[in-house]
Image: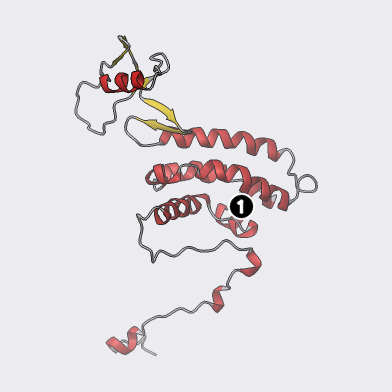
Amino acid sequence: MDKIAILAENNKTKFNEEKSKVMLLTRRKCKEQKEVAVYMNNKAILQVQKLKYLGIIFDYKLTFREHINYVGHKCKKLVFHLAKSAKINWGLSHKALQTIYLGGIQLLLIYGAPVWIKAVRKENNTGRLLRVQININMAKAYRTVSHEALCVVTGMMPIDIKIEEAARLYQLTKGTANNNTKFDKDMEVRYWQHLAEASISSTDKKEETGYTDGS
């Protein structure tokens, strides 16, 4: 803190201790003293268990559960308002809803993905993000339709895969990933390759082992 005070003095500025917060990052399970006393301008700084920095909520264990809940709640409000204008026989069209989703909701869901990507790989966190996805409104389908079917019908990538893609793309552009990493290019459903046209290579186990099915 002395170095920070000297830095502020040299640059003719002053930090506000009332707006500053301190958080202890630890994943240790032992019962230890987790309260720290940090002072700025001879005043104690408030210690918190979570704080928001550049739009991402960090908790003291770095689970990012609070951030996922925050983003999910924020996007649910947008989905709720769009649901009023996306009925079966009237309202916004599929193209309009898709534009709103790609330009607004999806960007909110994948923001800062390289930082909290490990949290997405947990099933309970993934479920929260999938429930937010607006596919059900774009397809104008019943709620009983599975999420995978809705993604196929609307041509949208599942949000958990999209977050993984955003994190890997960041690692590739920043030089922290293998240059041979391959990414799928976004394209419309009509240009998707049919499974019957995909080349699948397999090894005939019968010729290797001499096993037959008895016929």
Q: Position of residue 200 (x, y in %)?
A: 45, 78
Q: Which residue is mark 1?
A: 145
| Residue at screen point 32% across, 33% down | 61
Residue that appears at 32% across and 25% down: 23
Residue 108 image-quadrant placement: top right
Compare residues 171 and 188 and report the one nearer the observer: 171
Vertical comparison of 98 with 23: above or below: below
Whether residue 141 appears in this view of the structure is: no
Tell me where residue 202 appears, x and y as whole percent: 39, 80
> In the rendered view, does 36 fall on the left or right side of 84?
left
Residue 5 location, quadrant: top left
Residue 2 visible in the picture: yes
Query: In which quadrant of the rendered image does the C terminus lie?
Result: bottom left
Q: Which quarter of the figure has residue 21?
A: top left
- In the picture as drawn, the residue positioned furthest to the top comes out as 42
How many discs mark residues in the rendered view? 1
Q: Residue at 67% across / 49% down in the picture?
A: 99
The percent coordinates of residue 88 (x first, y second) are 76, 48
In which quadrant is the N terminus drawn? Answer: top left
The location of residue 188, given as percent across then percent down, is: 64, 63
Q: Toward the viewer: 210 or 65?
A: 65
Residue under the point 75% across and 44% down:
87
Q: Nearer the viewer, residue 27 or 174?
A: 174
Q: How is the image coloured?
A: secondary structure
Q: Amino acid at mark 1?
A: Val
Name above or below for residue 1 compared with residue 102.
above
| Mark 1 Cα-neighbour bin, 10 Å: few <14, some 14–19, many ≥20 | few
| In the depicted structure, whether residue 95 falls above or below residue 181 | above
Q: Is residue 192 above or below residue 145?
A: below
| Circle 1: element type | loop
Q: Residue 143 vs residue 34: left or right? A: right
